[in-house]
Image (tube, rainbow, N blue to C red):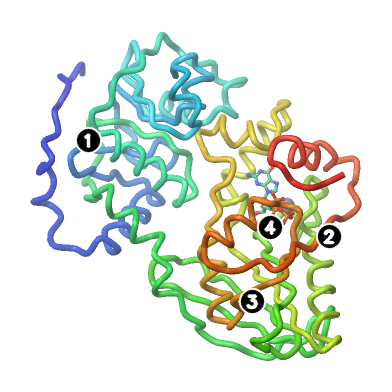
Amino acid sequence: MGCAQRSYPAGDGVRSLNGASPSRRAAQAVDALRHGWPIALVGGPVLLPAETAIAASAASDRMLIGAARAETLKLANQREAAVPHAPVLVRGAEPFDLAAARAMADPALDLATPLKGPFRAEPIDWREGAAAALELARIAGILPAFMVDPIEAGEAQPFAPADLAALADQGSLVIATRAHLPVAAGEDAEILAFRSADDMREHVALVFGKPVSDRAPLVRLHSECLTGDVLGSLKCDCGPQLDAALEAASAEGRKGGWGVVLYLRQEGRGIGLVNKLRAYRLQDQGHDTIDANRRLGLPDEARDFPVAARMLDLLGARAVRLMTNNPAKVTALEAAGVRVAERVPHRLPDNPHNTRYLATKRDRAGHLLP
Ligand SMILES: Nc1nc2c(ncn2[C@@H]2O[C@H](COP(=O)(O)OP(=O)(O)OP(=O)(O)O)[C@@H](O)[C@H]2O)c(=O)[nH]1
Ligand SMILES: [Zn+2]
């Protein structure tokens, strides 16, 4: 192989954008990554997602990974490692085939598949595109690792870094439908489902009591946790927190006020279920919840709080009493335009499996926990 370093003039690829809108290109790029198809960065290389790639004979000289993953390979400099999900371009001594690329992508495999170096970090002159591609991988819920300009990659989906903004636009979020939903916490609850053209995830709100605009509702922003909410996982405190939030919101309704539980489909603090389970494997190897995310090359916090603010706005709640132990959540919601009139602590008893998790939230993420 040994292909010469290509240069990527800004216009390269623009001709192949076919006049599609940024939101269509962004949606098609996420879809491509989920299917294992390559994307063609405008002003940059073709990138093949290592985890999902279906091109069995693909091979490349270089890979794009996150800085914290590169640090585990002793490749990131200090400045890069300070931003764990910053892009790092890595050249291998030998070309990466798909198996080698996947081993590079997934740190949870390191014990089983030792990597064959030496590797070398190279400067990236398409940095904005590189960062956008890693973010796109997070949104797609796959490992942030790409083969760069691979041979035999198949047809690529054009993607411009600026297209990413379309995925963060809350403008199109609407209440899609609403219905009465009797639940264990209260028989008079109403469920509202929200939809946005740019996001396949359907968030919901459960409202107890009568919304009255002159009274701040008691609100819980609950982030999806399939393992804790549905399966009763003891590794976190999500299940008991959800039950207690529903009870508290319902009690507020019974007292003549109103209570709201937003159920936000942002699994694993926004990295998705599969990547959260990969983080659990790393936790089993001794890493805490924050380092586990970072070693995967992912942010330890990637939730979208503006979407919660938009939902509250659609419900008519401009000020809220927020049930949380996480001051960063208060700040994020206020930054998105919702006044937090009061922070209401939302602590539940711990268990032997989640004490380290809760201690990490307290000591490293600033949660107000005993
Ligand atoms: N990536 C990752 N996500 C986790 C882990 N444990 C729980 N989660 C997710 O974390 C989210 C809940 O966030 P927490 O940090 O527990 O709490 P919080 O919502 O910030 O704070 P509170 O409002 O005080 O509960 C859910 O989306 C869970 O799926 C983990 O070990 N790794
Ligand atoms: Zn959980």
Circle on res. 45? 1
Which sits in the foreground, 147 or 165? Answer: 165
**Does residue 260 appear to the left or right of 64 in the view shown?**
right
Determine which of the numbered discs, if any, sits on residue 205 in the image.
Answer: 3
Q: Is residue 14 left or right of residue 59?
A: left
Q: Is residue 332 above or below residue 108?
A: below
> Of helix, strand and loop, which one carries label 3?
strand
Q: Does label 4 point to a residue whose CB lies under 8 Å from ligand 1?
A: yes
At horizontal 12% and vertical 52% (from top left) the residue drawn is 16
Q: Identify residue for label 2.
A: 240
Mark 4, residue position: 226
Could you tell me which quadrant the C terminus lies in? top right
Mark 4–mark 3 distance (CA, rounded to whole Å): 17 Å
Ranked by sequence position, the earlier of labels 4 and 1 is: 1
Q: How far apart are marks 3 and 1 (CA)?
A: 42 Å
Between marks 4 and 1, how big is the CA–CA gap?
36 Å
Indicate the amino acid at tag 2.
Answer: Pro
First reached walking from the N terminus: tag 3 or tag 1:
1
| x, y percent for residue 93 | 34, 10
From the image, state whether disc 1 or disc 2 is nearer to you: 2
Tell me the mark number nearer the camera, choosing from 3 and 1: 3
Task: Give the residue type that dot 1 points to.
Answer: Pro
Q: Nearer the viewer, mark 2 or mark 4?
A: 2
Distance (Cα) linking label 1 and label 2? 46 Å
* Nearer to the camera, 330 or 224: 330
How dense is the environment of label 4, judged by Cα within 10 Å: few (below 14), some, or many (20 and up)? some
* Residue 116, x across and y down, in percent: 45, 12
